[in-house]
């Protein structure tokens, strides 16, 4: 599979030649996956050493979005910051030269290629993604062994890094169940591998790992999947039941802390409440909240929108347009209208354009005249509206 532009990067592309079906059935939340491909330029469209240098030296990033780490000793923020959280960039590079790893968090918020990459994977997972970038000196190790509380993809960009996988002291930990070397046994090594440029690894949350650079400096991207869990949904479910049913809001029995308290009756009440909870039927509304929260949190990627709007008068039925890369939306049929939801907004449109709307939003490239179910005037009206809203773009005016 050839490397697409970063705006079209997908899970298929990321883990090729492994298929998505195999990934979700055999690896997702189960075990690590390592893909080697001997294609050093595979991730070249996402990041480079020069881009990292540009970000560090020109964008005024601050601590803690930039952190230095060294597995051999503790690097204090005061060693490379001034005026509280401002970076002393020269000092950052000095410490890097002395063996400390430069960690840049949330780089998808400042590097367009990473933003587009995350958005495409977010569309497939229905979870937010975050990219951190690690620049490690030759033969150095930034972080000590640990596990993450979110699943990660590790994309090796420059040179190589050796990884060791250990045990799983906490299976599928929640965000609050962070790794603690004092309490969690890392276990024995179960897997060792070296990532070369263009290779990728997937490491489920809860699996202990560490890594160190080889003979040259290493640059890799970690894409973290910030998944919502059944725990999140169950907590919402219980909270809503408690708000709407006074039976759950009654006090615990008086005297429950006394030695002679009869716990049997209290347990019967507890089991009754569990039974009552199981009869609640608000699953759809709770899941809709999670849908709304995800869709409304995905900001549209609108680079080039000025040119798109300026060219609207030149649009014709022969124009080639398409859904914007990384577009995330949700359609709901409500009475005699369609609600198009995206990034916290809702656009109400007539139900009669549903077929054309679905076609437009699900095709990356099409000719306006090919929109189904509308006359030529209706096609142009719909396409112009969707371009103004940032949902479609003219292919000839994409940046």
Image (spheres, rainbow, N blue to C red):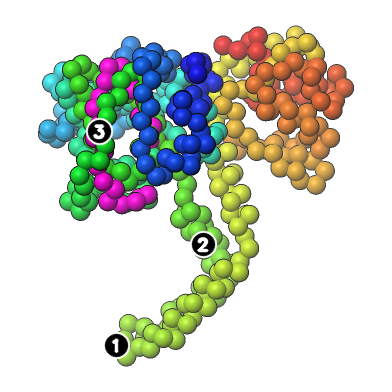
Q: Nearer the viewer, residue 167 or 66?
A: 167
Which mark sits nearer the N-terminus, 3 or 1? 3
Q: Determine the residue positioned at 29% across, 48% down.
A: 168
Q: Residue 142 is drawn in which quadrant?
A: top left
Secondary structure at numbered mark 2: helix
- Extreme residue toward the right, this view: 375
Q: Residue at x 33, y 18 (%)?
A: 197
**Of 188 and 244, the residue lying toward us:** 188
* Element class at badge 3: strand
Q: Nearer the viewer, mark 2 or mark 3?
A: 3
Q: Which residue is mark 1?
A: 259
Is residue 192 among the parts visible in the rendering? yes
| Cα–Cα gap, marks 2 and 1 | 31 Å
Residue 117 visible here? no
Residue 229 place in picture, x, y as percent: 46, 50
Q: CA distance from mark 2 to mark 3?
A: 44 Å
> For the residue labelled by badge 1, is the local secondary structure a helix, a strand or a loop?
loop
Looking at the image, is 18 positioned above or below residue 259?
above
Residue 332, position in %: x, y? 71, 42
Please identify the quarter of the rendering in which residue 337 is found.
top right
Start-end of magenta stretch: 152-173
Residue at mark 3: 192
Q: Residues within 10 Å of mark 2 (few under 14, many from 20)?
A: few
Please state which of the two labelled residues, at mark 3 or mark 1, is closer to the viewer.
3
Within 10 Å of the Cα at label 1, are there few (<14), some (14-19), or many (20+) other Cα atoms?
A: few
State the residue at coordinates (32%, 82%). 257
List the residue tagged with mark 2. 239
Nearer the observer, 302 or 71: 71
Above or below for 216 versus 275: above
Q: CA distance from mark 3 to mark 1?
A: 55 Å
């Amino acid at each position: 599979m050839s490397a697409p532009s970063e705006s079209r990067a997908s899970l298929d592309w990321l883990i090729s030649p492994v298929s998505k079906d195999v990934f979700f059935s055999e690896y997702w939340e189960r075990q690590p996956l390592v893909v080697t491909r001997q294609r050093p330029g595979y991730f070249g469209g996402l990041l480079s050493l020069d881009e990292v240098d540009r970000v560090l030296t020109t964008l005024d990033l601050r601590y803690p979005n930039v952190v230095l780490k060294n597995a051999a000793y503790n690097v204090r923020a005061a060693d490379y910051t001034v005026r509280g959280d401002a970076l002393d960039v020269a000092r950052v590079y000095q410490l890097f030269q002395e063996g400390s790893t430069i960690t840049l968090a949330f780089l998808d918020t400042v590097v367009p290629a990473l933003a587009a990459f995350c958005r495409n994977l977010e569309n497939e997972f229905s979870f937010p993604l975050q990219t951190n970038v690690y620049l490690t000196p030759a033969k150095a190790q930034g972080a000590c062994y640990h596990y993450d509380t979110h699943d990660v993809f590790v994309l090796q960009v420059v040179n190589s890094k050796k990884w060791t996988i250990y045990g799983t002291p906490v299976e599928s930990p929640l965000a609050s169940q962070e790794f603690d070397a004092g309490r969690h046994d890392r276990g024995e090594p179960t897997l060792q591998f070296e990532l070369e440029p263009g290779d990728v690894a997937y490491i489920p949350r809860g699996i202990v790992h560490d890594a160190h650079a080889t003979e040259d400096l290493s640059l890799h991207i970690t894409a973290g999947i910030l998944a919502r869990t059944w725990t999140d949904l169950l907590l919402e479910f219980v909270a809503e039941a408690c708000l709407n049913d006074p039976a759950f809001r009654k006090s615990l029995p008086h005297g429950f802390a006394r030695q002679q308290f009869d716990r049997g009756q209290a347990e019967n009440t507890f089991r009754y409440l569990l039974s009552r909870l199981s009869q609640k039927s608000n699953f759809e509304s709770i899941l809709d909240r999670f849908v709304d929260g995800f869709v409304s949190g995905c900001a549209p990627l609108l680079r080039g929108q000025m040119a798109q709007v300026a060219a609207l008068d030149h649009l014709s039925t022969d124009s080639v347009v398409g859904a914007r890369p990384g577009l995330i939306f949700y359609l709901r049929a409500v009475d005699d209208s369609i609600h198009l939801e995206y990034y916290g907004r809702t656009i109400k449109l007539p139900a009669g354009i549903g077929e054309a709307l679905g076609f437009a939003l699900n095709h990356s490239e099409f000719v306006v005249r090919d929109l189904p179910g509308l006359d030529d005037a209706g096609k142009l009206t719909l396409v112009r509206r969707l371009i103004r809203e940032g949902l479609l773009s003219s292919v000839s005016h994409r940046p």
